[in-house]
Amino acid sequence: MKIRILVLFVMVFALCSNVSAKEYTFGIVPQQSAKKLAQKWGPILNWLSEKAGVDIKFATARDIPTFEKRLAAGEYDFAYMNPYHFTVFNRSPGYVALARQANKSIQGILVVHKDSDLSTLSDLQNTTLAFPSPAAFAASLLPQAELKKNNIVYKPRYVSSHDSVYLNVAKGLAPAGGGVMRTFKNTDPAVRAQLRIFWKTSKYTPHAIASHPDVPVVDRRKVQNALIAMGKSEVGAELLRSIRFEGLQIADDDLWDDVRALNLTVLDD
């Protein structure tokens, strides 16, 4: 009997060990190169893994459309996605909001070369403009909606990432391009020095950190608690500052109703 109990204990312990060793992917929207994202987010995810007691691995995609396809297929266990992405993939496959950047709203920008004589949106009439991807919320959707509202005819050229937008404009390959303040501040200083912010959009709820609905609730809560605790830890706060976050706060799905109210349908067609 003692031997049977011992064998049962070993089996249960092994099963629990396998469960706790489960590896989760954390997909980061590819606003910048995979190398740059890995450098910035890798240490953050290592910290989260240690504090949450689960194994979290960095993941991204070669471009935003590929990232969107992977979200639609539910390939990421956790993901950092733009506000519009969350409203779409919250419906299906059902990503659940965990956190958002603290004390922050998202705002799109249009940048031009520092020596450009462009001064108003009407100056963009009949131009070809650089954008990251069709469904990039603040960097593409918001500026394009404003251009359409003002009856400005333009041709969009999608260049895969925010950094590519900034580089295209800096090199004179496009008169203007869309981005957001965070990626603009994080881009190569030599590129940023060649640019100036031309126009800004209204402000909205920022990117979501969300979990796939199949992630067990216990692990989901562990990760959420670690995310919120990160900004309260000296080391964690320093890591967040590396991506220009002041901290993280708990979020629920309804927080993105301001984005839902825009009735955007880019990924629903």
Image: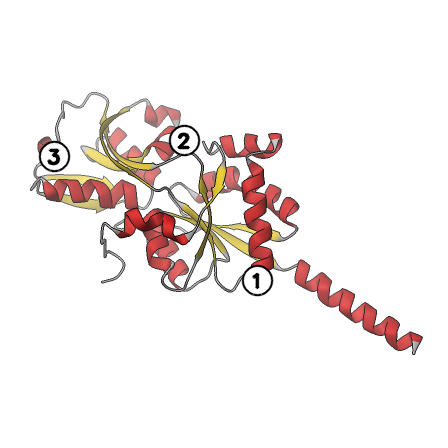
Inspect the image, locate mark 3, and give the three-letter code of the amino acid beneath it: Leu
Residue for badge 2 = 186
Between label 3 and label 1, give the one nearer the viewer.
1
Crowding at dot 1, Cα within 10 Å, few <14 / some 14-19 / many 20+, comes out as: few
Vertical position of residue 85 compared to residue 9: above or below: above
Q: Are marks 3 and 1 in contact (CB under 8 Å)?
A: no
Position of 7 relative to 92 (above/below) = below
Q: Which comes sooner in the sequence, label 3 or label 1?
A: 3
- Residue found at x 28% / y 41%: 139
Residue 254: assigned label: none
Q: CA distance from mark 3 to mark 1?
A: 49 Å
Residue tagged 1? 216
Q: Amino acid at mark 1?
A: Pro
Mark 2–mark 3 CB contact (< 8 Å): no
Q: Is residue 49 above or below residue 111?
A: below
Decide which of tag 2 and tag 3 comes sooner along the chain: 3
Of residues 53 and 194, the one drawn nearer to the viewer in this rendering: 53
The reply, left or right, for residue 241 in relation to residue 164 is right
Instruction: Give the mark count.
Output: 3
- Disc 2 crowd rating (10 Å Cα; few below 14, some 14-19, many 20+) is some
Residue under circle 3? 124
Which quadrant would the N terminus be assigned to in this image?
Answer: bottom right
Disc 1 and disc 2: Cα gap in Å?
34 Å
* Percent position of residue 203, x then y: 29, 37
* In the displayed structure image, the side of residue 179 where residue 52 appears, left or right: right
- Residue at figure coordinates x 23%, y 26% from the top left: 113
- Is residue 158 left or right of 245 when viewed as pictured? left
* Closer to the camera in the image, 17 or 227: 227
SS for callout 3: helix
User: Mark 2: which amino acid?
Assistant: Asn
Of the numbered discs 1 and 2, the one sitting upstream in the chain is 2
